[in-house]
Image (tube, rainbow, N blue to C red):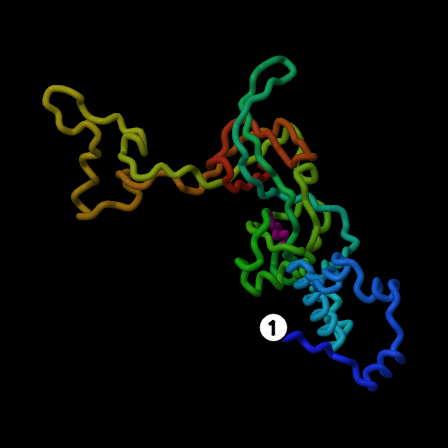
């Protein structure tokens, strides 16, 4: 085999090698470094996906907030104007009326000082409010129209809303009735309670709508005795004859089967046993017309 020819450096290469100094060990260490450092430098830093998205979102929000200026009107919450409450007036003492409006609560019993049991009816009597005042100069008589119970504003027509607003009442009232003024001066907006009108031991009359019983026959409706029960009789609970044959018609008011109850009934001679002003409860001896929750009118009986 032919021996390979050794490369001899040219004069230019010798001059270049002489001019360039040899790198030292420290320089080689700085330039090369360890393998871990090189891999650390070469490996790019990767942020978590959530942090990166959050950072981008914050950057976008910051850029948007910087680009779009927010006015003070947009930052402040809109305040809804509340309905102004009626101004308070200096009203005279409540008048003494001939009656009040209430609601039947139910029946119970109490014991008097002698230990006797008394059946009473609890009535939520008031508070009532004066809505309008009738004067002899304008209306020809003297009375006060009072209201009881709260009513929804959307269920009240515009004229009545104006009446309640003129009286200084913030809410419409559901039940209205006029009563005579016995003593004192009535002014719109006054609050009248049971203790202002009635006293314990006073005799009153109560008016209300009786319980509806539906269609009933003459035995249940009017207490007819009925016919024979035996010996082949077929007229046990029938009314039979309906009147004379002369007029050729049934006279008005004839006691015949029909709807029973749900009528306006007044019971007189009832006595007020107790008054509880803190709960607006009045205990009346005996039974009064209507079911529990029905509207009743309690009036003085002369």
Residue 232 visible? The answer is yes
Please state, as top left, top right, bottom left or bottom right, where the C terminus lies in the image. top right
Residue carrying label 1:
1
Relative to residue 66, is residue 226 depicted above or below? above
Q: Closest to the observer: 253 or 133? A: 133
Q: Quadrant of residue 166?
A: bottom right
Magenta segment boundaries in residue numbering: 142-148
Q: Is residue 89 magenta?
A: no
Q: What residue lies at 72% left-to-right and 50% top-to-bottom? A: 185
Q: Quadrant of residue 59?
A: bottom right
> Residue 128: image x %, image y %?
64, 46
Would you say 300 lies left or right of 96 here? left
Q: Residue furthest top?
A: 115
Q: What residue lies at 65% left-to-right and 43% top-to-bottom? A: 127
Q: What residue lies at 71% left-to-right and 54% top-to-bottom? A: 187
> Residue 261: image x %, image y %?
38, 38
Relative to residue 96, is residue 155 depicted above or below? below
């Amino acid at each position: 085999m032919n021996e390979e020819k050794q490369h001899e450096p040219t004069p230019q290469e010798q001059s270049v090698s002489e001019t360039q100094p040899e790198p030292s060990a420290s320089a080689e260490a700085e330039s090369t470094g360890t393998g871990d450092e090189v891999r650390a430098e070469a490996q790019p830093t990767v942020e978590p996906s959530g942090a990166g998205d959050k950072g981008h979102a914050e950057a976008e929000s910051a850029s948007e907030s910087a680009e779009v200026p927010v006015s003070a009107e947009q930052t402040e919450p809109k305040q809804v104007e509340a309905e102004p409450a009626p101004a308070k007036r200096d009203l005279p003492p409540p008048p003494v009326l001939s009656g009040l409006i209430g609601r039947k609560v139910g029946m119970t019993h109490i014991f008097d000082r002698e230990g006797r049991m008394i059946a009473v009816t609890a009535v939520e009597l008031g508070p009532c409010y004066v809505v309008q005042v009738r004067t002899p100069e304008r209306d020809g008589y003297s009375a006060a129209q009072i209201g009881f119970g709260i009513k929804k504003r959307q269920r009240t027509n515009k004229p009545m809303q104006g009446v309640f607003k003129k009286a200084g009442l913030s809410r419409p009232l559901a039940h209205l009735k006029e009563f005579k003024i016995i003593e004192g001066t009535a002014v719109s907006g006054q609050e009248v309670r049971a203790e202002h009108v009635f006293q314990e031991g006073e005799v009153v009359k109560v008016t209300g709508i009786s319980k509806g019983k539906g269609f009933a026959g003459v035995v249940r409706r009017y207490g007819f005795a009925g016919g024979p029960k035996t010996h082949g009789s077929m007229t046990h609970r029938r009314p039979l004859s309906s009147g004379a044959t002369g007029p050729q018609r049934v006279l008005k008011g004839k006691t015949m089967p029909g709807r029973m109850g749900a009528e306006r009934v007044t019971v007189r001679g009832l006595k007020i046993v107790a008054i509880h002003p803190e709960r607006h409860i009045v205990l009346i001896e005996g039974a009064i017309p209507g079911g529990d929750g029905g509207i009743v009118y309690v009036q003085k009986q002369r």
